[in-house]
Image (cartoon, rainbow, N blue to C red):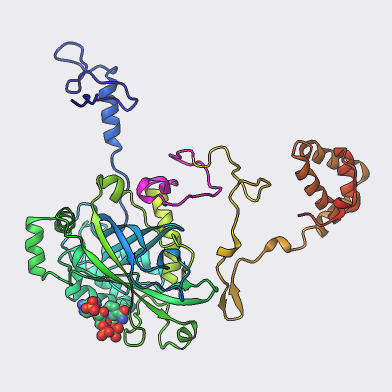
């Protein structure tokens, strides 16, 4: 017989009676010393976290991405390098404008966000079921969403606000046409396509870049609801998409999608008749044919909706080597805003929540923050540092520069600027006593550092002014030799 599970408080203390408050006499009042009751009430008051400002209502499932056609000629992403290779994924579908309790079968764009747990880190493809979006400039996003959510006075969704905004922003027309076509009302999450929507870049092992778009084509076939069918569905079941996805997976009727890409060379991008980074445009299929790269299958339901679906955090900035951003302005803004939203909603350590944790080692110098689980241990929390076994940058992963007319976007090494002339000039302004006081003040602290570090720093003083170096060396009691006159490393 299995051992009986003891009910406990959050500190692990076994509970003897979990049905009756502690009272002074049978009729009360309730005593403050009923710490069991207090803890239960206090935890309950904090059970909800801020809901997502968009995509609040969602459903999620785990699954597998399997490569069918590797594309090493375009990308060095390891998880795309071999046929048959499998990567675990977590997918969250959602409606956009409705709140967390909204009905599923509403006319709306659907979110289609995929987290690929690759060996080189998590790659998040945070897309929709539409290949385009309402706006091409992120400056308009907040206003767009205000117009689609509730009116400040009536607290109703308001067609006047929606069409007011859309009619003043004609770049929304492509997305409006999709939204009001049949596909604006999917029959379920299983019966719709997904799109990365933005243009991204693929970078291969030779550092060559092409632009790409991602498409997921449902293997279940596209199925949609009429407005009347949707109204009937909502009347009976507000969670129709959640139910459909959950039950299909429980029945082992695993939904799957073909995963395809479109590729555009930099040369083609320069000559394309539309801006290839405009989120309101597609790349026509006849010019940029879909190329199958793999299959996505969803085959496992989460065990705890809150921990795995509500606390799932996707960010377009979660890239892996071989996949990067493009100049798409809306993508550029999303690279910042998603992580920012998660830090507000879940806290700065949202990566440590199991559903968000990469399946490969995470090694960096970020530390602490609310709800830290002690990441980093006792190792140094700054970079660069002098210690062998600390994480180091790996130049082979550096992204190639992106040419932008007369300049290129790159990480320029600012350490090679002139670092010495002005400190030397300042040194020479100081009078004798002041120089000695400064050298002594430096030595009193620098003397507590490792000898190696003292010598490295001395080289810098020498490069600014020989006298500066000599006085600090003397104050430290270090004999000056030619090595101190070399360039510091
Ligand atoms: P194609 O004639 O090659 O293909 C038409 C595309 O439209 C197919 O991908 C089809 O999806 C999709 N489609 C059909 N009905 C709808 C709908 N109600 N809402 C959204 N998509 C729908 O087209 P082109 O590439 O020349 O593009 C023409 C138009 O097709 C675009 O302006 C765009 O609106 C739409 N489209 C284009 C896509 C692209 O990446 N080029 C992607 C999706 C839509 P399916 O094959 O799954 O039936």
Question: From the viewer's perspective, is residue 326 above or below residue 304?
Answer: below
Residue occupying the point 19% across, 74% down: 180
Q: What secondary structure predominates along the stretch shown in magenta?
A: loop
Tally the numbered discs: 0
Residue 242, visible in the rendered structure = yes
Farthest right residue in view: 432
Q: Position of residue 171 (x, y in %)?
A: 34, 78
Q: Quadrant of the C terminus?
A: bottom right
Would you place residue 36 above or below residue 48 in this image? above
The image quadrant that residue 341 belongs to is bottom left
Toward the top, the furthest residue is 25
Position of residue 152 in the picture relative to residue 383 (left or right): left
Taking the magenta stretch, the answer to whether it contains residue 396 is no
71 relative to 284 in the view: left or right: right
In this rendered view, identify the residue nearer to me: 263 or 41: 263
Closer-to-camera residue (42/204): 204
Of residues 75 and 314, the one nearer the viewer is 75
Going by the image, does 80 lie left or right of 465?
left
Residue depicted at 77% across the width and 62% down the height: 418
- Is residue 57 at all visible to an observer of this figure? no
Position in image of residue 79 (x %, y %)? 41, 63
Asked if residue 355 lies in the magenta stretch, the reply is yes
**Which residues are the magenta region?**
346-374
Q: Position of residue 34 (x, y in %)?
A: 27, 19
Location of the N terminus by quadrant is top left
> Dividing the image into four equal quarters, which quarter contains ligand 1?
bottom left
Q: Position of residue 391 (x, y in %)?
A: 58, 50
Q: Find residue 109 and report its image quarter.
A: bottom left
Q: Is residue 68 left or right of residue 465?
A: left
Give the quadrant of residue 445. Answer: top right
């Amino acid at each position: 017989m299995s051992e009986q599970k003891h009910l406990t408080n959050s500190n692990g203390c076994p509970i003897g009676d979990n049905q009756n408050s502690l009272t002074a006499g049978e009729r009360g009042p309730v005593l403050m010393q009923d710490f069991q009751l207090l803890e239960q009430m206090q935890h309950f008051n904090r059970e909800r976290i801020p809901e997502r400002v968009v995509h609040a209502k969602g459903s999620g499932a785990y699954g597998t991405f399997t490569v069918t056609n590797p594309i090493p000629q375009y990308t060095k992403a390891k998880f795309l390098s071999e046929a048959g290779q499998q990567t675990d994924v977590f997918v969250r579908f959602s409606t956009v404008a409705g709140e967390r309790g909204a009905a599923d079968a509403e006319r709306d764009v659907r979110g289609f966000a995929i987290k690929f747990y690759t060996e080189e880190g998590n790659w998040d493809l945070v897309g929709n079921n539409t290949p385009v979006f309402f706006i091409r400039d992120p400056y308009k996003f907040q206003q767009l969403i205000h117009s689609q959510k509730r009116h400040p006075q009536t607290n109703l969704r308001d067609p006047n606000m929606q069409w007011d905004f859309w009619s003043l922003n004609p770049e929304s027309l492509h997305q409006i046409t999709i939204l009001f076509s049949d596909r604006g009302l999917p029959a379920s999450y299983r019966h719709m396509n997904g799109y990365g929507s933005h243009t991204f870049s693929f970078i291969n092992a030779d550092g060559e870049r092409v632009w790409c778009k991602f498409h997921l084509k449902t293997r279940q076939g596209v199925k949609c609801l009429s407005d009347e069918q949707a109204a009937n569905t909502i009347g009976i079941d507000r969670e129709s998409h959640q139910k459909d996805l959950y039950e299909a997976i429980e029945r082992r009727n695993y939904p799957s999608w073909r995963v395809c890409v479109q590729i555009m060379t930099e040369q083609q991008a320069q000559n394309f008749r539309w801006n290839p980074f405009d989120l309101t445009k597609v790349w026509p299929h006849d010019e940029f044919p879909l190329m199958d790269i793999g299959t996505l299958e969803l085959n496992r339901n989460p065990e705890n909706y809150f921990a795995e679906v509500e606390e799932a955090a996707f960010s377009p900035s979660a890239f892996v080597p071989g996949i990067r951003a493009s100049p798409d302005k809306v993508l550029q803004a999303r690279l910042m805003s998603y992580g920012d939203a998660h830090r507000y909603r879940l806290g700065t350590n949202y990566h440590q929540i199991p559903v968000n944790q990469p399946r490969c080692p995470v090694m960096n110098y970020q530390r602490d923050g609310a709800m830290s689980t002690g990441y980093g241990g006792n190792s140094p929390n700054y970079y660069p540092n002098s210690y062998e076994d600390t994480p180091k940058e790996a130049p082979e992963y550096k992204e190639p520069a992106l040419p932008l007319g007369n300049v290129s976007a790159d990480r320029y090494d600012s350490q090679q600027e002139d670092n010495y002339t002005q400190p030397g000039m300042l040194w020479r302004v100081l009078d004798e006593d002041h120089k000695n006081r400064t050298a002594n003040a430096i030595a009193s602290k620098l003397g507590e550092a490792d000898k190696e570090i003292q010598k490295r720093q001395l080289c810098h003083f020498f490069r600014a002014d020989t006298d500066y170096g000599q006085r600090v060396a003397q104050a430290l009691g270090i004999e000056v030799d030619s090595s101190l006159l070399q360039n510091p490393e």
